[in-house]
């Protein structure tokens, strides 16, 4: 399925590239450039099978863990556990036993402030550390879902994000949540329509993936907005053209993967 969809993906990038160039909007050009680099990398990784999916999950998890650690000001012990968790869990999923390493990391991040005797900031450190573990654990779903379903979900979420941005700007209407004033219900509906259309075209429109795209993806965006607002920042990073940080790009995918893995 991935190879069959590759020409259509390339065509979509080409057509959208012409439209972006015609618009002359610098922000759109920056975003399209990031898409043009990311799409072949993700597709190529998933074409390599479960091992490629695991490698992709490790890279995404480690970078996101670093960005999150800076956002919430985690100390070195919690950061180290979060990075180890991001690197180990996809590999453990590949080997069929991800529960024990996940439990060890959860225990370690909870006990780190206790063992250091941090009475002033210990509860905050433990809470943010455990939240990070739970937030990034769904990346192992790239392995658990299998390359074909993972590719369909990644592409559907990506298109849903674009459709939501376009629909929200064109239609406007009621705001989705105080956590993200720029998001609207019209954007959510347009995003759901675009994402579900992609799943249908790929022959992957299952109930689990449909809910993951239509409900999980916008919730994932709100989760990151909540974290960023708590940290008092606009973006998780500043290195990814048009998006800020990698966490700003994959926030929707994190919860969508969790939903896809949990639902039957």
Image (cartoon, rainbow, N blue to C red):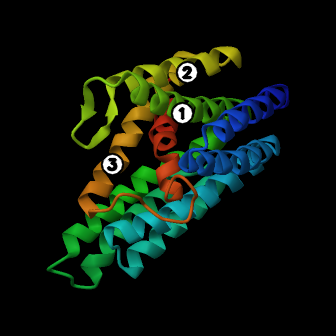
Residue 143 is situated, as x and y percent measured from the top left of the image, at 66, 43
Snapshot quadrant of residue 205: top right
**Residue depicted at x 60% and y 28%:** 156
Q: What is the number of the mark on residue 194?
A: 2
Classed neighbour count for the residue bearing mark 1: other residues with Cα under 10 Å, few (<14), some (14–19), many (≥20): some
- Between the residue at mark 2 and the residue at mark 3, the CA separation in whole angstroms equals 22 Å
Residue 74 is situated, as x and y percent measured from the top left of the image, at 35, 73
**Residue depicted at x 63% and y 21%:** 198
Q: Is mark 1 on a helix, strand or loop?
A: helix
Residue at mark 1: 162
Q: Earlier in the sequence, mark 2 or mark 3?
A: 2
Foreground pick, 65 / 19: 19
Say left or right for 125 vs 109.
left
Q: Are marks 1 and 3 in contact (CB under 8 Å)?
A: no
Q: Are marks 2 and 1 in contact (CB under 8 Å)?
A: yes
Q: Which of marks 2 and 1 is nearer the N terminus?
A: 1
Residue 100 visible somewhere in the drawing? no
Q: What element carries label 2?
A: helix
Q: Nearer the viewer, mark 1 or mark 3?
A: 1
């Amino acid at each position: 399925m991935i190879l069959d969809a590759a020409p259509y993906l390339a065509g979509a990038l080409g057509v959208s590239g012409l439209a972006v160039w015609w618009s002359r909007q610098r922000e759109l050009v920056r975003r399209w450039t990031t898409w043009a680099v990311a799409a072949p990398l993700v597709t190529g990784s998933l074409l390599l099978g479960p091992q490629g999916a695991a490698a992709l999950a490790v890279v995404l998890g480690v970078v996101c863990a670093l960005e999150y650690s800076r956002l919430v000001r985690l100390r070195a012990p919690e950061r180290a556990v979060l990075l180890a968790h991001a690197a180990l869990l996809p590999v453990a999923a590949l080997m069929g036993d991800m529960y024990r390493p996940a439990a060890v990391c959860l225990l370690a991040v909870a006990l780190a402030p206790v063992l250091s005797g941090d009475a002033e900031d210990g509860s905050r450190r433990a809470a943010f550390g455990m939240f990070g573990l739970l937030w990034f654990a769904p990346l192992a779903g790239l392995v658990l879902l299998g390359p074909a379903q993972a590719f369909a979900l990644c592409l559907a979420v990506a298109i849903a994000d674009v459709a939501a941005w376009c629909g929200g700007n064109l239609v406007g209407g009621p705001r989705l949540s105080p956590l993200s004033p720029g998001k609207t219900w019209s954007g959510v509906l347009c995003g759901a329509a675009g994402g579900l259309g992609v799943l249908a075209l790929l022959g992957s429109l299952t109930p689990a993936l449909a809910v993951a795209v239509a409900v999980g993806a916008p919730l994932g965006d709100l989760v990151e907005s909540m974290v960023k607002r708590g940290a008092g920042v606009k973006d998780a990073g500043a290195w990814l053209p048009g998006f800020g940080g990698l966490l700003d790009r994959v926030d929707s995918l994190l919860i969508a993967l969790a939903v896809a893995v949990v639902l039957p």
